[in-house]
Amino acid sequence: MPAGVSLRRLRPHEDGRGVFAEIFRGEWDVGCHPVQWNVVHSRPNVLRGVHVHAMHIDYLMPVSGILLLGLHDLRESSATAGQSTLIEIEGARPQAVTIPPGVCHGFYYPVETTHIYAMSEYWDPDEEIGCRFDCPQLRLDWPARDPILSERDAAAGTYEEMRTAFRKRWDELYPGVPC
Ligand SMILES: Cc1cn([C@H]2C[C@H](O)[C@@H](COP(=O)(O)OP(=O)(O)O[C@H]3O[C@H](C)C(=O)[C@H](O)[C@H]3O)O2)c(=O)[nH]c1=O
């Protein structure tokens, strides 16, 4: 798992009416102090990403369906630099994932899925850096070769272009700080 990524198993409480689960408590110290929450509904065979951010942390969990999360560590000074992993999380057995800046992420949904996620900073389009989901340097073996993509993700550039853009933004934000 790329350094700084954390998984927290959530506790669904099921009864005759359905399911209740706590998804966030400040005392859990999940590595993200949310200022914004989002809910995302995705159709089967949708893939969102691959994206990476220099400033904000994402904290997310599926609440229904299945989320296949692809992660890749883009940080040159990270102990897990270049590490990639795919994690499948079911909404019925939810886990909350914290994704730090510098860890690329993409989400594939094999079935209709809803996920909720929080951000540690308000959305800033300048934070939206990414590359094509099927760039070989990501070493993410997605189960779909022709997923449904947004126009942005379909037109995304190369891994090297992403790395250059990320490094430029990082150096602008944190001059002299190793990435
Ligand atoms: C992120 C965001 C988007 N939007 C609008 C912009 C678009 O009209 C629409 C879909 O946005 P986007 O295509 O960027 O959504 P995803 O492709 O799911 O990506 C988002 O979710 C994953 C986790 C990422 O890592 C991205 O950073 C984040 O952009 O929602 C908003 O109004 N507010 C927001 O905070």
Image: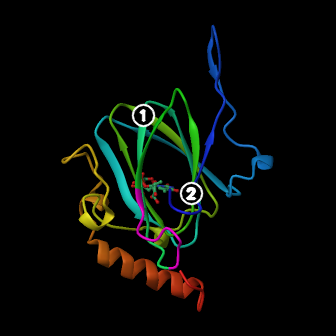
**Is disc 2 placed on a helix, strand or loop?**
loop
Given the current orientation, which residue lies at the most extreme right position? 27
Given the current orientation, which residue lies at the most extreme front position? 79
Location of residue 60 in the rendering, given as x and y in whole percent from the top left corner: 56, 47
**Is disc 1 placed on a helix, strand or loop?**
strand
Q: Which mark is residue 66?
A: 1
In this picture, is 77 found above or below 11? below
**CA separation in Å, label 1 and label 2:** 19 Å
Q: Quadrant of residue 25?
A: top right
Q: Which of marks 2 and 1 precedes in the sequence?
A: 2
Q: Does residue 81 show up magenta in the picture? A: yes
The chosen color scheme is rainbow
Location of residue 102 in the rendering, given as x and y in whole percent from the top left corner: 50, 70
Residue at position x 31%, y 78% from top? 161
**Amino acid type, mark 1:** Ile
Q: Which residues are magenta?
A: 77-84
